[in-house]
Image (cartoon, rainbow, N blue to C red):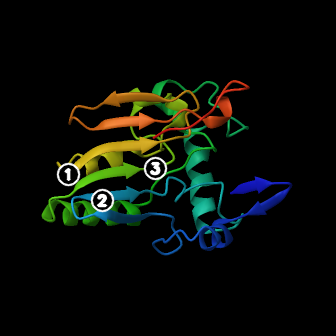
Amino acid sequence: MVITASIICHRDKLLPFLKIPGLNGHACYDFSPGPEHRLVVLDGYDISAIGWPRGHPKTLQALEFLGKKNPNSDKNSPAGLLGLERRFVMFNGAAGREQLKWLDGILQDATKLEQKVIVCCHLPLDLCASSQEALLWNYDEAMNVIHQYNCVKACLSGHDHKGGHSSDSHGIHHRSFEAALESPPGTDAFGH
């Protein structure tokens, strides 16, 4: 959901506007900038209480999940949650089963084509490259799929404003980019 000047824009309007291809209304897609590489973009808000209409099954699934995982009345608060449980807040989300199955197929194809893959997701996939509060709810399930293949070389994310970098047990680099809005006044925010 994008909130600008009190206008709420759900993904059914936002995805076509941004020309984001997707899988059945999901914002996951892949593309190859050349024969040796593939970029895979995951929809970290596939199961989420934000971005879908209020009564949508994905919203209801997320709210039910949060009801079980986060006892706080303010579901955006990790207060009282310990360790990795701190990721179960409303401003995060999950990649659904259908998307994880799609990811598995994409990585199988990339392996056959001997492509090097970069996986991108707004929500971080590695706890060493991010605070626990910013992680994809089911980062472990996504990484279980990714770790089945040697083609994935890096996972790029945002969401955690401080940023971070790690290299996991399979040699995959994880980079959470710092938020541009955290740049001090008079400085530039860019990367290349």
* C-alpha distance separating marks 2 and 3: 14 Å
Dot 2 amino acid type: Arg
**Kind of residue at disc 1:** Cys
Quadrant in which residue 23 is drawn: bottom left
* Residue 63 visible somewhere in the drawing: yes
Count of numbered labels shown in the rendering: 3
Label 1 with label 2: CB-CB less than 8 Å: yes
Picture quadrant where residue 51 is located: bottom right
Q: Earlier in the sequence, mark 3 or mark 1?
A: 3
Q: 82 or 122: nearer the eye?
A: 122
Instruction: Report which quarter residue 115 is drawn in.
Output: bottom left
| Circle 3 residues within 10 Å: few <14, some 14–19, many ≥20 | many
Q: Decide: marks 2, 3 in contact (CB < 8 A)? A: no
- Number of other residues with Cα within 10 Å of mark 1, as a class: few under 14, some 14 to 19, many 20 or more: many
Q: Is residue 83 left or right of residue 35?
A: right
Q: Position of residue 112 (x, y in %)?
A: 13, 65
The percent coordinates of residue 31 (x first, y second) are 36, 65
Residue pointed to by mark 2: 38
Query: SS class of the residue under badge 1?
Result: loop
Query: Which residue is located at x 35 percent, y 28 percent?
Result: 166
Q: Residue at x 51, y 29 (%)?
A: 163
Residue 176: which disc? none
> Looking at the rendered structure, which numbered label has been put on residue 121?
3
On the image, the x and y values in percent for residue 35 come to 23, 64
- Circle 2 sits in a helix, a strand or a loop, which is it? strand
Residue located beneath label 1 in the image: 151
Q: What residue is rendered at 27% in x and 47% in y?
A: 144
Q: Residues within 10 Å of mark 2 (few under 14, many from 20)?
A: many
**Label 3 SS:** loop
Is 55 above or below relative to 67?
A: below
